[in-house]
Every structure is written in C-alpha cells, then in structure tokens.
Amino acid sequence: MTPATGASPLAGRRVLLIVGGGIAAVKAPDLVRRLRERGAAVRCVLTRAGHEFTTPLALSSLSEDRVFTDLFDLTDESEMGHIQLSRQADIVLVAPATANLMGRMAAGLAPDLAATLLLATDKPVMIAPAMNVRMWLHPATQRNLALLRGDGVLVAGPNEGSMACGEFGPGRMAEPLEIVAALEAHFGAEPQSRPLQGLRALVTSGPTHEPIDPVRYIANRSSGKQGHAIAASLAAAGAEVVLVSGPTAQPDPAGVQVVRIETARQMLAACQAALPADIAICAAAVADWRVATEAGEKLKKENGAGPPSLSFAENPDILATLSGMSQGRPGLVVGFAAETEKVIEHAIAKRRRKGCDWIVANDVSPATGTFGGDNNSVTLISDGEPESWPPLSKAEVATRLVQRIAARMGSGGQGA
C-alpha cells in the first residue's frame, strides 16, 4: 500500500498490533487500514479471544502481512521467533487491551504469544484499554494501570460512552483515528517532549535493610513505588537514568540502569559510583541507624538472660552527602521527607539542614496508606512558597515532578 503524502510521522514506522478479545476488536481492521494509509507497516497478533470478534483473514488482507496467533506457529521458534517478532517493530500497540491483558502485562505473565511478546519486547508499548465500566473502575484494574504507566507504557483512551453491555461510562476503546493520533504524537513529538535528553539522573528508591544478625534486620515500610515511578518518568523524558534500589518487589523500569543494594552504606557507595550526574533524586527511605556490630551468628533467646542489648550507629546521610559535594555536585538535588506530623514544617527544616535544592514532603502516617499504596499527597518545598499538589497516583506525582525538573533545568542549564 502506498503511504499517504509523507506528512505523517507514522510513514515508514513498523507497528506490531496485538488484538485482544472483546467487542472492540471489531475496530481492529479499521485501525490497521488507518495505519496503512499513513505509511506504517503493520504486523498483527490475534489472541484466542480476539478470534471471536475478528478474523486473521481480515487483518492479513488489510495489513498485507501474515497474522500470528500461537506461540509455536512462528516460522522457526527454535530461533526464538517470538523474541525477533517483539523487537522488529518500532512500537507494540495493544488494541483492544482488555482487563485480562492488562493484568497479565502488569504481573509479567506470559501464557500465550501476545503476553510473551509484551514481556520480551524492548520497544515502546501503547495500550488502548477497552472493557465494561465496572471492570475499568475496579481497584485491581486501576492498580494495574498505575503500574503499567509507571513502567512507561503509553495509554490511549479509554473514552466514555454507551457500551455493548448496555451500560454507560468510561471503558470504550478509543476510536481508530484517536489511536492513530496518539501514535503520531509519540513519533512526531518535538524535542521538548524529551526535555531531559542528554542529561544523566540518579534516583534512589525503596527501603534499606540493616542487618542485626544473619537472619534479622532493621527496615521500614517503603515499597519503592514512588522512586521507581520517578525513574521511569525521567527515562521517558529522555534522561539517562541510574536507579539505586533497596530490596523491593517493584519491576525494573524500562530503559533504566538498576543497581540493587541492601544497606545504607551500599546505597551511598552505589550513588557515588554513579556520579557524575546532572540530577539526583533521593526518594529512598534510608534507615537512619544500623546495629553498630552485626552478629556473626543468629542471636539466641537464652533462658532468663532477657533480650540482647543492641548498640546503634548512625548511617551515612546520602542526601546531605550529595548536596554538600564541593566538586561534581549534581546541578539539582531533590530529597524526600516522609513525615507523620508537622509535615511541611519538618520538610522545610530538613531542606535547610541537608542543603538540597528541593524537598518533596509527604505524609506517611498509617491513615494515609502512602507506604505501600499507589497514591500520594505531596508538597514541593523549594525557594518559594510550599506548593501543595492534589492527591495523585504515584505515577502522576512522578510525571509532575519531572515536568518541574525539566522547567528548572531548561531555565538556565544545570539546575540554575
């Protein structure tokens, strides 16, 4: 098919389209046609559920390419055809992205060809969600969505409207032309869409574990969700990102170099090794103290002896160390203040004490659900008046923070 007049950023791009199940799959042939009109090459993968709503023949006819349906029907799976298929495209598009597909993506499961391709790809991924309104609004779906956004997955839609089930609300798949526009925006974005291109960022995330003996340690309740989301957003903005992470169940953000550590001293060493950096964001919840002398063997409960006496030593202050460097200090150093009372007052004092440029203050008292949760309420402390943001998902907090960083770095260079 001849590309449309070379105006579309999609001209010459290769799109791997994964068609999930659901009534919205009937729009897939039109989506293929619209992509081909703009000069894109389209290769389709049809899930088993997708077969119920459209056919390989329809997709093959419009894409002028083979349609793949099964993990073992690739030309030569002995040569890892699914790996090649996932990486020969410029972008992987999932439309419709059902609740089931989104859940498998978020969990990193790979029971079929579609999910395996999504797990194996090193290319950008965009989803166009489509499902019943109740399914879309369900907390599990919203958790999966937040996790996928944090991993850098692009999202088109969904729209609000009448559904095949007779209900009304959000959950309708975006129309083919809307999805095409989202893809064009991705590929045709001006340089300002990657405003941190050429800059290097260091991010710390998660808790630290400070050993008492070989089986016990001191820790905190940090999940690493906020720090990992910040690393993903920085990478999406074009920065080269090194993420130094304590023990966490969070998946590695796409396009980010991850250094795993356990203790505060290891985290400081990893941060120093990652320098020089233009931006440093200390989002980790580093333990303030450690046991002065770690026991070489498991401490035993001796009859009548009572609990062991533990002596503590202060851990290195990573934020203050980075902020106070006389040479090679990052142009912008951002810390986090996890507080349970007088949040803004304590954060302002912490910024002054540590010498960092900004502090992101958040209330982590048990009633907020911040530790381990998907949402956060923060106040940005800088030279001006404290800037309180509305309650947002941690992915949205990360996006907004990176926007502020881009504005700062662009206003005068290295953190001016």
Image (tube, rainbow, N blue to C red):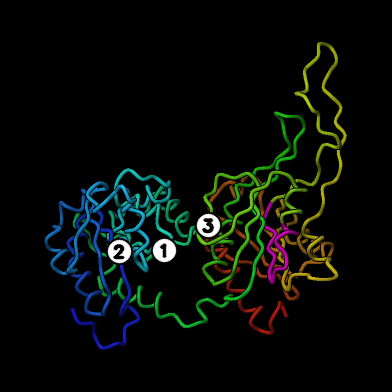
Q: CA distance from mark 3 to mark 1?
A: 13 Å
The number of numbered badges drawn on the structure is 3
**Mark 1 neighbour density, 10 Å: few (under 14) some (14–19) many (20 or more):** some
Q: Earlier in the sequence, mark 1 or mark 2?
A: 2
**Mark 3 neighbour density, 10 Å: few (under 14) some (14–19) many (20 or more):** many
Q: Are marks 3 and 2 in contact (CB under 8 Å)?
A: no
Which label sits on residue 123? Answer: 1
Q: Residue at x 57, y 63 (%)?
A: 397
Residue 37 falls left or right of residue 366? left
Q: Nearest the camera: 137 or 222?
A: 222
Q: Is residue 123 visible?
A: yes
Q: Nearest the camera: 36 or 222?
A: 36
**Mark 2 neighbour density, 10 Å: few (under 14) some (14–19) many (20 or more):** many
> Is 186 part of what is drawn in magenta?
no
Which label sits on residue 253? Answer: 3
Q: Secondary structure at mark 2?
A: strand
Region of the chain picked out in magenta, as a range: 271-284
Q: Residue at x 84, y 12 (%)?
A: 304
Q: CA distance from mark 3 to mark 2?
A: 21 Å
Amino acid under disc 3:
Pro
Q: Residue at x 36, y 45 (%)?
A: 110
> Is 273 part of what is drawn in magenta?
yes
Name the front one of labels 3 and 2: 2
Q: CA distance from mark 1 to mark 2?
A: 10 Å
